[in-house]
Image (spheres, helix red, strand yellow):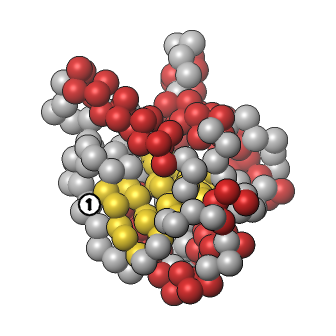
Amino acid sequence: MASPDKKNASKYEIVFVGRSNVGKSTLIRSLTGKPVPIGRRPGVTRKPGNLALGDLVVTDMPGFGFMSGVKDRKQDIIKTKFVRYIEDHSKRIILAVLVLNVQSFAEIVDRWSGRGEIPVEVEMYQFLQELGLDVVVAVNKIDKIKDKNRDSVMDGVAERLDILPPWKQWPDKLIPISAKKGDVKALSGLIRSRIHELGRDDLLGYIRLGV
């Protein structure tokens, strides 16, 4: 739900965050119908990409994690700028969308956890929550998972993010999607409801209803 200070903002922002090549740019295009640069290899997007839609700004954040062809020092600079951007814009961010690749998420998290390290997706989710942002996890490529296995896979995603399963009790926190196929109706509905709560129905036309 939109907080009072967000309602008084002159601009509103929705940020899309996630590892490189999890489908952030494709998802934004599915939701808005607007083309955004899509990287052909991990780490192509190194600066926030802002899509201005009237008083609504949709931002494609640089992918965190592996960055192809980028030196470690440069990666650290990019990460610092990433964190600073989110912090500096937190007062106008009405929704943070953490995009995950359902096909690789569990394996990556378990591998990092097995080394005693905090997986970057988990760290990012916690960071966004600590800032007091409204965070939703868009679990992408769900079409690649067989119907009979989807609930157990989604429950696994929830557990790894320290969200109590079953996942279906959290419709505002966990949403399965297929950005490539345009299956984003539930996420679109959530975004539109947040815009409506701001009293800015004039901005609803910028977000597609989804299929």
Q: Quadrant of residue 92?
A: bottom right
Residue extending furthest toward the top = 116
Q: Residue at x 28, y 47 (%)?
A: 47
Dot 1 falls on a residue whose secondary structure is loop
Residue pointed to by mark 1:
38
Asked whether residue 92 is in view, the answer is yes
**Whether residue 96 is situated above or below residue 207 in the rendered picture:** above
Residue visible at 38% across and 49% down in the picture: 61
Q: Is residue 149 visible?
A: no
Residue 152: give x, y in percent of width and height.
72, 49
In the picture, the quarter occupied by the N terminus is bottom right
- How many residues crowd around disc 1 within 10 Å: few (fewer than 14), some, or many (20 or more)? some
Q: Nearer the viewer, residue 43 or 49?
A: 49
Quadrant assignment for the C terminus: bottom right
Residue nearest the viewer, comparing 36 with 194: 194
Amino acid tagged 1: Ile
Residue 111 vertical placement versus 87 (above, below): above
Q: Is residue 191 left or right of residue 197?
A: left
Residue drawn 42% across and 36% down?
Answer: 84
Q: Residue furthest left?
A: 69
**x%, y% of residue 77?**
28, 27
Residue at left offset 22%, top offset 27%: 74
Give the x, y percent position of residue 167: 77, 52
Which is more toward the observer, 105 or 119?
Answer: 119
Q: Percent from the top left, x then y, of residue 59?
A: 40, 58
The image shows a total of numbered marks equal to 1
